Image: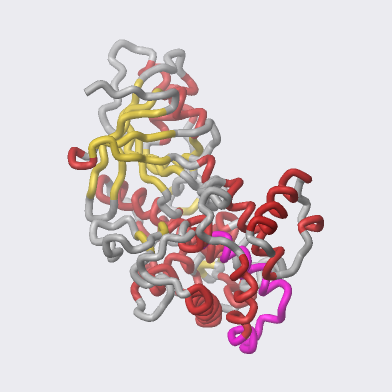
């Protein structure tokens, strides 16, 4: 079988393990360097010393010399996680690395890397990779293990597992820096992404919740039945974080900063009215956050009669993302209190004029997502398109869609 690959397309082998799936692929070192960044935990004399592993320049020089020698070899995989940026937020659809089956039975996939944007975190192997910056030889092929859409806390769990199994490292330092595991930290020390992971577990496993059985944990036992609509853990986590944090990464490091009496905790963070549930997060009122998200999406389910096998834009990644943004807008506009819970259904009914079956207009792309967000703001919040900082051609497209529907 002859397989024709376009530029930035690669053959990958899908590997399923209990933690989750990843793709083994060979990538050119220079190609990978251009698209990567590092943010691993740092251990220095038993203390946490910053947001990333401290790069040892002398070691990079040594690795660079080794790379330029005739004995150069790196048989172990570089572990990378694609599709989150340096601020720990999920990147737009157009920038995401994607894997499509070529021969699913054999586990052969096509990995597409659409741009040279830095959306690839080096989870393990950063010195090997960045040693190439000190080398003349840049075109060496590397074996890579690629996780797609793996949330930051899970990335950190991979890092911790790999390193803890290989050498005696103090686990508490890793947990304190990144908040790797829910079981190892007091809830008062949960970073925004760790709280989001906790809520993700609750909503995906609790009967009666909108997301029950519809979030892909990327585990071998996925609890997502065949033919059910499904979103990734990353999409849900990103949605929750959009309600409580501008920079989850900065919040994480501030929350887990060491002080004379231990870990600083959430109480050291400052409120921000742009993120309407942030005050609940800081005060550790996680139940209020859970209840608001729960009632909002239950109202969404009632209004649009969403069932397990729905296939409309509303239950695709861009739809869920857009409705999380709409929730943020609603809560910023209205007072966040117990009464808001009973108002969600009436507010969301205004979105019934939107054609959620039009997957061409609301395509799975940045453009499609922005169209959907603009239409939701127009129909639900009654904001004129002209007040949304849109280009004239974008306004024309949206008005044409409304005209098509006869509204």
Question: Measured from the top left, where is residue 235 in percent x and y?
Answer: 47, 58
Tell me where residue 66 sits by quadrant.
top left
- In the picture as drawn, the residue positioned furthest to the right comes out as 386
* Stretch of the chain drawn in magenta: 320-342
Based on the displayed image, in which of its 4 quarters is residue 230 positioned?
A: bottom left
Which SS type dominates the magenta stretch?
helix
Asked if residue 256 shows in the view, the reply is no
Q: Viewed as shown, does residue 308 lie left or right of 84? A: left
Taking the spot 58% from the left edge, 50% from the top edge, the residue there is 361
Q: Nearer the viewer, residue 254 or 398?
A: 398
Q: Is residue 242 above or below residue 120?
A: below
Q: Does the segment drawn in magenta span residue 159?
A: no
**Residue 334 painted magenta:** yes
Quarter of the image with the N terminus in it: top left
At x 29%, y 48%, the residue is 21
Task: Find the residue positioned furthest to the left.
Answer: 106
Could you tell me residue 387's position as x and y percent?
A: 81, 58
Q: Is residue 374 above or below residue 347?
A: above
Residue 366, percent from left and from top? 58, 46
In the image, residue 132 sits, relative to residue 118, either above or below, namely above
- Position of residue 161 in the picture relative to residue 393 (left or right): left
Left or right, residue 247 beside residue 64:
right
- Quadrant containing the C terminus in the rendered view: bottom right
Q: Nearer the viewer, residue 146 or 102?
A: 102
Instruction: Tell me the colour scheme of the image.
Output: secondary structure
Q: Measured from the top left, where is residue 148 in percent x and y?
A: 39, 46
Q: Nearer the viewer, residue 243 or 133?
A: 243
Q: Is residue 405 left or right of residue 180?
A: right
Q: Residue at x 50, y 63 (%)?
A: 314
Residue lying at 18% horizontally and 38% vertically, measured from the top left = 106
């Amino acid at each position: 079988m002859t397989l024709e690959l376009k530029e930035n397309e690669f053959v990958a082998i899908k590997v399923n393990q209990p933690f989750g799936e990843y793709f083994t692929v060979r990538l050119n070192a220079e190609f990978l360097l251009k698209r990567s960044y590092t943010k691993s935990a740092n251990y220095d004399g038993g203390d946490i010393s910053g947001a990333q592993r401290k790069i040892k320049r002398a070691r990079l020089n040594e690795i660079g010399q080794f790379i330029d020698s005739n004995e150069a070899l790196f048989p172990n995989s570089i572990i990378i996680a694609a599709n989150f940026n340096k601020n720990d937020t999920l990147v737009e659809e157009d920038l995401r690395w994607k894997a499509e089956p070529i021969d699913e039975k054999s586990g052969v996939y096509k990995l597409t890397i659409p741009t040279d944007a830095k959306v690839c975190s080096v989870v393990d192997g950063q010195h090997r990779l960045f040693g190439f910056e000190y080398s003349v030889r840049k075109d060496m092929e590397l074996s890579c293990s690629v996780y797609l859409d793996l949330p930051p806390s899970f990335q950190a769990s991979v890092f911790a597992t790999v390193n803890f199994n290989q050498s005696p490292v103090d686990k508490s330092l890793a947990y304190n820096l990144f908040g790797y595991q829910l079981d190892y930290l007091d809830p008062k020390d949960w970073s925004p992404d760790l709280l989001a992971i906790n809520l993700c577990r609750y909503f995906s496993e609790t009967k009666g919740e909108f997301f029950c059985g519809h979030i892909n944990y990327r585990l071998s036992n996925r609890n997502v039945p065949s033919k059910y609509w499904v979103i990734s853990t990353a999409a849900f986590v990103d949605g929750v974080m959009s309600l409580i944090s501008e920079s989850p990464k900065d919040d994480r490091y501030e929350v887990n900063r060491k002080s004379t009496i231990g870990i600083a905790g959430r109480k050291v963070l400052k409120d921000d009215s742009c993120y309407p549930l942030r005050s609940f997060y800081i005060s550790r009122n996680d139940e209020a956050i859970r209840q608001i998200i729960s009632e909002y999406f239950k109202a969404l389910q009632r209004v649009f009669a969403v069932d397990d096998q729905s296939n409309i834009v509303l239950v695709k990644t861009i739809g869920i993302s857009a409705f999380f943004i709409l929730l943020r807008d609603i809560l910023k506009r209205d007072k966040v209190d117990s009464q808001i819970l009973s108002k969600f259904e009436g507010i969301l009914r205004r979105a019934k004029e939107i054609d959620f079956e039009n997957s061409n207009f609301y395509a799975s792309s940045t453009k499609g997502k922005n169209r959907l967000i603009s239409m939701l703001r127009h129909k639900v919040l009654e904001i004129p398109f002209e007040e949304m900082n849109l280009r004239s051609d974008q306004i024309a497209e949206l008005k044409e869609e409304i005209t098509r529907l006869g509204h």
